[in-house]
Amino acid sequence: MEIKIGIRQSNRELTLDVDASVEDITAQVNEAISQGTVISLKDAKNRTVLVPAQALAYVEVGSETAHRVGFGIG
């Protein structure tokens, strides 16, 4: 699943491909914001990304469905 994280005072966004569910990501983000801590996410390549909750502008969580690949019409 793809996640896009907007950072305050930055023109760029972080884009991650993670194996977690929408509910897991939402819970982690909500907890970090409420406690003022750091969000720690592991991407599909097992890299860890840390974002301070105060720096968040937005978090966009993509769908969990598999996307079609190819040019077939059906």
Image (spheres, helix red, strand yellow):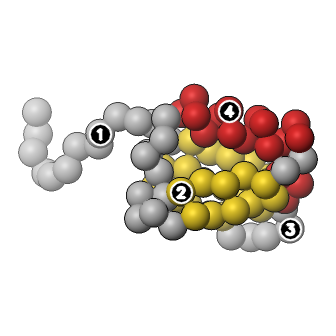
Disc 4 + disc 2, Cβ < 8 Å: no
Nearer the observer, disc 1 or disc 4? 4
Task: Specify the amino acid type for callout 3.
Answer: Gln
Q: Specify the label residue 9 is tagged with.
A: 3
Q: Specify the label residue 27 is tagged with.
A: 4
Distance between mark 2 and mark 1 Cα atoms: 20 Å
Q: Residue at x 81, y 58 (%)?
A: 52
Distance between mark 3 and mark 2 Cα atoms: 24 Å
Distance between mark 1 and mark 4 Cα atoms: 23 Å
Task: Specify the amino acid type for callout 2.
Answer: Lys
User: What is the quadrant of the N terminus in the image?
Assistant: top left
Residue 22 lies, in percent from the top left, at 54, 33
Nearer the observer, disc 2 or disc 1? 2
The mark that comes first in sequence, 3 or 2, is: 3
The mark that comes first in sequence, 4 or 2, is: 4
In the picture shown, does residue 52 fall above or below 34?
A: below
The mark that comes first in sequence, 2 or 1, is: 2
Task: Specify the amino acid type for callout 4.
Answer: Ala
Q: Residue at x 57, y 41 (%)?
A: 61
Distance between mark 1 and mark 3 Cα atoms: 33 Å
Camera-nearest residue between 71 and 39: 39
Residue 55 lies, in percent from the top left, at 84, 59
For label 2, the SS is strand
User: What is the quadrant of the C terminus in the image?
Assistant: top left
Residue occupied by mark 2:
42
Task: Specify the amino acid type for callout 1.
Answer: Ala
Q: Give the quadrant of residue 41.
A: bottom right
The mark that comes first in sequence, 1 or 4, is: 4
Residue occupied by mark 1:
66
**Disc 4 residue crowd, few under 14, some 14–19, many 20+, Cα 10 Å:** few
